[in-house]
Amino acid sequence: MDQDTSSLIRDDNSFEYSWHVRYSEVGHRGLMTLPALVNAFQDCSTFQSEALGVGMEWLKREQRAWFLTHWQIVVDRYPALCEQVAVGTFATSFKGVTGRRNFYLKGADGSLIARADSTWAFLDLTYGRLAKPDERHVAPYGSHEPLAMPREGRRINLPDSLEQREPLLVGRGLIDTNEHVNNCQYIQIALDQLPREVLPSRVRVDYRRAAVLGDTLYPSVGNLDGNTVVELADETGSPYAVIEFR
C-alpha cells in the first residue's frame, strides 16, 4: 500500500515517534520481526496514554484498565536493520465498553509499511467486570477517521483438524504489568509452533481470556482456507487466544 501518511493523518489526535530499527528488533534475515512490530504498536499506545495523563498509574488509581481483545494487522514489508521508521496511533471510536484504535508504521519517505486495527475492552478492576468508560477516560484521545483496512471478522474460525504441539508452562518472562501473559507473547508462541519461519503479510489475533503465571498453554496448529491457524488453549481445550497467519 504505497501511501503517504501525511494525507491520512490530518489532526492532533494521533501520537507518533520515530527511531531506527534496532538490532534487538530484527531476526536472522536482518528484518524487523512481527513481534517487534507488535511491541512497537503496543509501546506507542502506552506512550500516548502516558502523555495524555491517562496512563497506567492513573488508571490503577481509578481501578480501571483497557485490555486488548483483537488485532488485525497488515504488513506490506518488514523494515531492515537501522532503517529509519516512525510508528503512530490514534483512537477511531468508543462505543459501550469498547474502544477501537489504529496503528501504523511508516518509512522515512512517509509511505506506509504496516497498519493495524485493534479492539480494546474497558474493565472495572474492583468488580472484575466490563464497564463503560467515563468521558474523562476517553475524551483526551479524541478520535480520527480509521485507516483503510481489508474487511475481516473479529472471530477466527478453527479448522476441523488441529495438530497438537508440546505444552508450554507460563513462566515469569511472559508476564506483564497486568500479571497476565503479554499480548505479544501469544504471537511469538504461535510463530514458534510453525514448522518453518514465516513473514506473514496479514495477522489476526482473537484474545479470548488471559493466561497467568503457572498456567499451561496447549498449542495446536491447523490450516483453514490457506491460512495457518494456531490455537493456544488450556488442558480442557478452552482457548486463551487464536492466531491466524497468512
Image (cartoon, grey):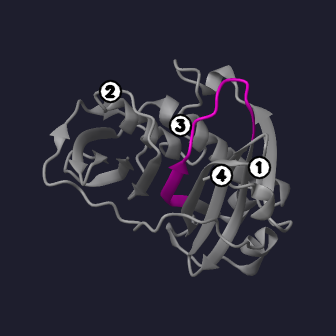
Q: CA distance from mark 2 to mark 1?
A: 34 Å
Residue corresponding to mark 1: 47
Q: Residue at x 78, y 63 (%)?
A: 7
Q: Are marks 2 and 1 in contact (CB under 8 Å)?
A: no
Q: Nearer the viewer, mark 3 or mark 2?
A: 2
Nearest the viewer among 148 and 172 is: 148
SS under mark 4: loop
Whole-angstrom CA distance, mark 1 to mark 3, is: 18 Å
Distance between mark 4 and mark 1 Cα atoms = 27 Å
Which one is nearer the viewer's eye here, 113 or 168? 113
- Expressed as whole percent of the image width and height from the top left, the position of residue 237 reads 21, 51
- Could one spot residue 213 in this view of the protein? yes
Q: Is residue 136 magenta?
A: no
Can residue 182 be seen in the rendering of this structure? no
Label 3: which residue? 35
Residue designated by label 4: 2
Residue 44 located left or right of residue 183 = right
- First in sequence: mark 3 or mark 2? 3
- Pointer 2 residue: 196
- The image shows residue 78 at horizontal and vertical percentages of 58, 36
Tag 3 secondary structure: helix
Query: Where is residue 60 shown, x and y percent of the image?
Result: 69, 58
Of badges 2 and 4, nearer the viewer stands: 4
Position of residue 119 in the picture relative to residue 88 (left or right): left
x and y, in percent, of residue 61 in the image: 73, 61
Whole-Å distance between the Cαs marked 3 and 2? 16 Å
